[in-house]
Image: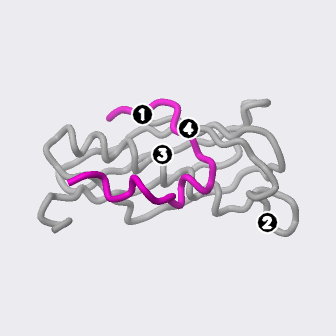
Amino acid sequence: MGNPFEDRPTYVAHTGIELTDASADHCDGRLEINENHHQPYGVVHGGVYCTMIETLASTGAAIWAMENGMAGAVGVTNKTDFLKATTEGVLLGEATPIHRGRTQQLWQVDIRLEETDRLVAQGQVRLHNVTQTEFS
């Protein structure tokens, strides 16, 4: 059976988030901001940060889970703090694990504005390690 998502656009693809490096120990990504990412006041919508944080944490966590005999990992909590409003530029995200256990993981994600290296958002995602039978 092939990948069920291959022939359809995903939510993350619509956002423009690009994974730049991913392993069981970290996940990095970038997003070039455009007007589609703005809320009505002209700054990046908070959901963009939440999505980037969830995407990077989930990717690293899933890689680790699969390397340890599980089917993957899914987010169960996303706590995101918005630290500095942004309007343009490139966002760089870096996810690293805080805890990786038998049933759950906790990952930290920092998002910085590439041009200034300023921290603009930070989040933690708690993830559930999924067994194959949970996907059946």
Residue bearing the label numbered 2: 39
For the residues labelled 2 and 3, the Cα–Cα distance comes to 22 Å
Amino acid on which the number 1 mark rests in the picture: Ala
Whether label 4 touches label 3, CB < 8 Å: yes
Q: Quadrant of the N terminus?
A: bottom left
> x, y percentage for residue 62?
31, 47
Vertical comparison of 3 with 94: above or below? below
The circle drawn on residue 22 is 1
SS at circle 4: strand
Spatial separation of the CA atoms under disc 1 and disc 3: 8 Å
Q: How packed is label 2: few (under 14 Cα within 10 Å), some, or many (20 or more)?
A: some
- N-terminal of the pair, mark 4 or mark 1, is 1
**Contact between labelled residues 2 and 1, with CB atoms less than 8 Å apart:** no
Give the residue at x 59% y 46%: 17
- The disc, 2 or 3, on the residue closer to the chain's N-terminal end is 2
Q: CA distance from mark 2 to mark 4?
A: 22 Å
Quadrant placement of the C terminus: bottom left
Amino acid at circle 2: Gln
Q: Which residue is mark 4?
A: 29
At label 3, the amino acid type is Leu
Per the image, the residue denoted by label 3 is 56
Q: Residue at x 78, y 30 (%)?
A: 115
Helix, strand or loop status at disc 1 = strand
Which badge, 1 or 2, comes first in the chain's sequence? 1
Instruction: Pinpoint residue 90: horizontal percent, then vertical percent.
Output: 73, 38
Residue 96 picture location, percent across and down: 43, 38
Question: Which residues lie in the magenta part?
Answer: 1-25
* Disc 2 secondary structure class: loop
